[in-house]
Image (cartoon, helix red, strand yellow):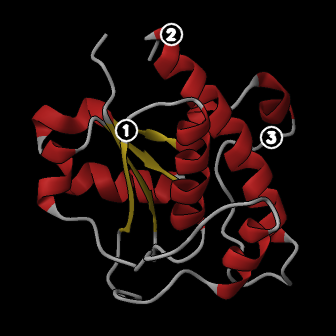
Amino acid sequence: MKQISSVLFVCMGNICRSPSAEAMFRSKSLAASLDIKIDSAGTIAFHQGNSPDKRSIAAGIKRGLNFDGMRARQVEQTDFADFDLILAADKQNLEDLKRICPTEYQAKLALILDFCDFDYHQKAYTEVPDPFYGAGDGFELVLDLLENSCDQLVRRIQRGRL
């Protein structure tokens, strides 16, 4: 199995789920002393240049996450070559990535929750739900799912089992 040295997290607008995943995975990677390039992007450019959603930041800060310097951007063609693993928040974003991803890089694409442990899959979460239009409590659920998935991803990278 190829050594993972870079991970890109992707959602639609790159202001809620994917920057939260970036912040969570950065925290987990640092704690595990992994030297990994970590970034996030969106499948659309609507929020390009914007900071992450204030509700994402507020929920993340309560867990010690850092969002400093993050700005929304759209996935670029160079990302498919530049990143070893490209993880989408949901099936629609994964399909959008598959549509624009060159054939030789398709194996790099997966869902973020493909790395979650069995307990979360029992709760029927196969995708990270979009909290943008919710009342605010969805941001905590997003972080719970991301924390579980990022923990498992770090363990698998350390063991060389992807």
Residue 101 visible in the picture: no
Q: Amino acid at mark 3?
A: Ala
Q: At 55% across and 80% down in the image, what residue appears?
A: 52
Residue 95 visible in the picture: yes
Q: Which residue is mark 3?
A: 124
Query: Which percent across, then down, holds residue 71?
Result: 40, 80
Query: Which percent across, then down, holds residue 84?
Result: 27, 35
Query: Which percent across, then down, holds residue 57?
Result: 67, 76
Quick check: 6 above or below 15?
above
Q: Amino acid at mark 1?
A: Ile
Q: Which residue is mark 1?
A: 36
Q: Secondary structure at mark 3?
A: loop
Quick check: 78 above or below 117?
below
Q: At 83% across and 63% down in the image, what residue appears?
A: 140
In-front residue for pair 147/101: 147
Task: Judge the density around disc 1: few (<14), some (14-19), many (≥20) Cα neighbours within 10 Å.
Answer: some
Q: Secondary structure at mark 1?
A: loop
Q: Are marks 1 and 2 in contact (CB under 8 Å)?
A: no
Please name which of the two marks, 2 or 3, marks the residue nearer to the observer: 2
Sequence-wise, the earlier of marks 3 and 1 is 1
Quick check: 45 above or below 22?
below
Q: Which residue is mark 2?
A: 159
In-front residue for pair 14/107: 14
